[in-house]
Image (spheres, helix red, strand yellow):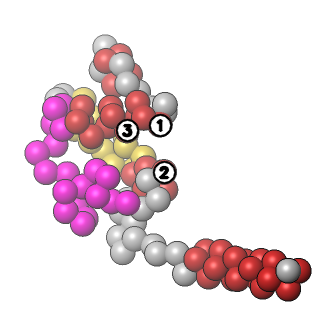
């Protein structure tokens, strides 16, 4: 029984080590900050921070693998940003959070 637990522990540790060492990195990490046009205003979007928060799951925001989000506008921002901010309880979710006068 002790041998079984020891072997299981070794297998678990080796799995954790290899998954950490060989973690997939995105091909294109993109810029640190992206200037997003929102009407007449521009918002500094922390792209690399968001990549880290989504564990490099680019499809969370992008339709395609890399590149600009197609048809970027207020409706797209509401569709992509608000549900994620709401779910993670981080970032602006109210009108005033993004639409500062």
The location of residue 21, given as percent across then percent down, is: 61, 80
Majority SS type along the magenta span = loop
For the view shown, which residue lies furthest in the top direction? 101
- Residue that carries the numbered disc 1 in the rendered image: 88
Q: Position of residue 90 (x, y in %)?
A: 49, 33
Q: Name the outermost residue toward the left.
A: 71
Residue at numbered disc 2: 53
CB under 8 Å between callouts 3 and 2?
no
Left or right of 6 on screen, residue 45: left
Q: In front: 59, or 44?
A: 59
Point out the stretch of residues depicted in magenta: 57-76
Frontmost residue, 34 versus 95? 95
Q: Is residue 56 above or below residue 19?
A: above
Quadrant for the C terminus, please. top left
Say which of 66 and 37 sits in front: 66
* Separation of marks 1 and 2 at Cα, in angstroms: 10 Å
Side of 96 where 49 appears, left or right: right
What is the x, y in percent for residue 46?
42, 46
Residue 83 on the magenta segment? no
How far apart marks 3 and 2 lie (CA) works out to 11 Å
* Residue 83, image quadrant: top left
Mark 1 vs mark 2, foreground winner is 1
Q: Are marks 1 and 3 in contact (CB under 8 Å)?
A: yes
Residue beneath the point at 74% across and 80% down: 8
Which mark sits nearer the N-terminus, 1 or 2?
2
Question: What secondary structure is found at the residue carrying circle 2?
Answer: helix
* Image quadrant in which you'd find residue 28: bottom left
Q: Are marks 1 and 2 in contact (CB under 8 Å)?
A: yes
In the picture of the structure, the residue carrying the numbered disc 3 is 84
């Amino acid at each position: 029984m002790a041998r079984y637990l020891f072997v299981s522990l070794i297998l678990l540790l080796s799995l954790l080590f290899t998954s950490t060492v060989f973690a997939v990195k995105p091909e294109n990490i993109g810029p640190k900050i992206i200037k997003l046009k929102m009407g007449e205003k521009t918002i500094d979007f922390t792209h690399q921070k968001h990549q880290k928060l989504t564990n490099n799951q680019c499809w969370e925001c992008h339709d395609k693998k890399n590149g600009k989000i197609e048809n970027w506008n207020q409706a797209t921002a509401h569709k992509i940003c608000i549900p994620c901010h709401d779910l993670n309880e981080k970032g602006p979710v109210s009108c005033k959070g993004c639409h500062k006068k």
